[in-house]
Amino acid sequence: MASVARVNRGLMERLGRLSRLKLLIPLRRSPHSPEYSARGVAVGMFWALTPLVGIQMYLCLMTWLVVKPVKNLQFSLVISCAWTWVTNVFTMLPIYYVFYATGQIIRGDWHNITGYDTFIHSWHEAFERGAGFWQAMLDLAGMLAREVGLSMAIGCLPYAVLGTWLSYKISLKYIRRRRRKKLEKRIRQHASKDGSEPQTAKGVHFPDRPSA
């Protein structure tokens, strides 16, 4: 039991580091305004919360091309692609199942919700046939589309809409707070050198940078 706990703890730590690398580092290093970066998070989260694993980055690119002429809708393509990683090989099936169950409830067919084991069994079958990773993904996607596709398409919508809104608000607040703290730190360092009274960065506005 202790060895299993150590393995699980190590796995969670690795996933935590990977999440930080994939999701937070791009936000911290972005040269763009908080709004520009937060819109990237929102777009990535929207596509992440749809049953379209495998083509989400392409959908981010298509969205970026569509809104590029509109300055107030522009977003970071790099950040949006990074945040599609929220749904991945490890999280895909549980999230898909939540979409399916929610769709069944919305359609009023909650008495006929298929068990979660069906999803796991189908996933295992796809790999046990000896197919490559992408072929297995295609087989699984085909199975899901045939059997539960409509329910997943309907069920993902509440999560995609809510996730988009929340991710924008939370990431915008996070970026602004982080940049304000960095600015205040620089102000204090500068003040300590010339002996002046330290100022705060409250109310500082970071304008959009219209770049790709």
Image: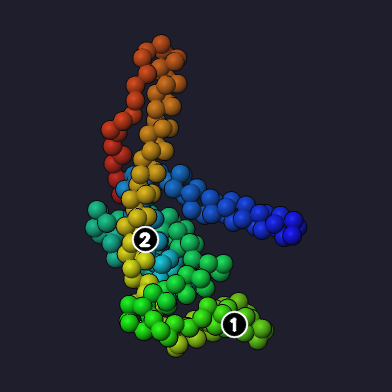
Q: Nearer the viewer, residue 32 or 117?
A: 117
Verify CB contact (< 8 Å) between mark 1 and mark 2. no
Seen as rendered, the residue at the extreme top is 195
Q: Residues within 10 Å of mark 1 (few under 14, many from 20)?
A: few
Q: Position of residue 90 (x, y in %)?
A: 57, 67
**Which secondary structure lies at badge 2?**
helix
**Which secondary structure lies at badge 1?**
helix
Q: Which residue is mark 1?
A: 121
Q: Nearer the viewer, residue 70 or 177?
A: 177
The amino acid at mark 1 is His
Seen as rendered, the residue at the extreme bottom is 146
Q: Looking at the rendering, in which quadrant would you find the C terminus?
A: bottom left
Residue 136 visible somewhere in the drawing = no
Mark 2 or mark 1, which is nearer the start of the sequence?
A: 1
Q: Position of residue 155 (x, y in %)?
A: 37, 74
Q: Which mark is residue 46?
A: none
Residue 187 relative to residue 133: left or right: left
The amino acid at mark 2 is Gly
Depicted 164 relative to depicted 193: above or below: below
The quadrant holding residue 175 is top left
Q: Which mark is residue 163?
A: 2
Tell me the residue at 35%/47% (across/down). Answer: 172
Tell me the residue at 51%/71% (across/down). Answer: 94
Depicted 110 relative to depicted 197: above or below: below
Q: Position of residue 140 (x, y in %)?
A: 53, 82
Residue 19 visible somewhere in the drawing = yes
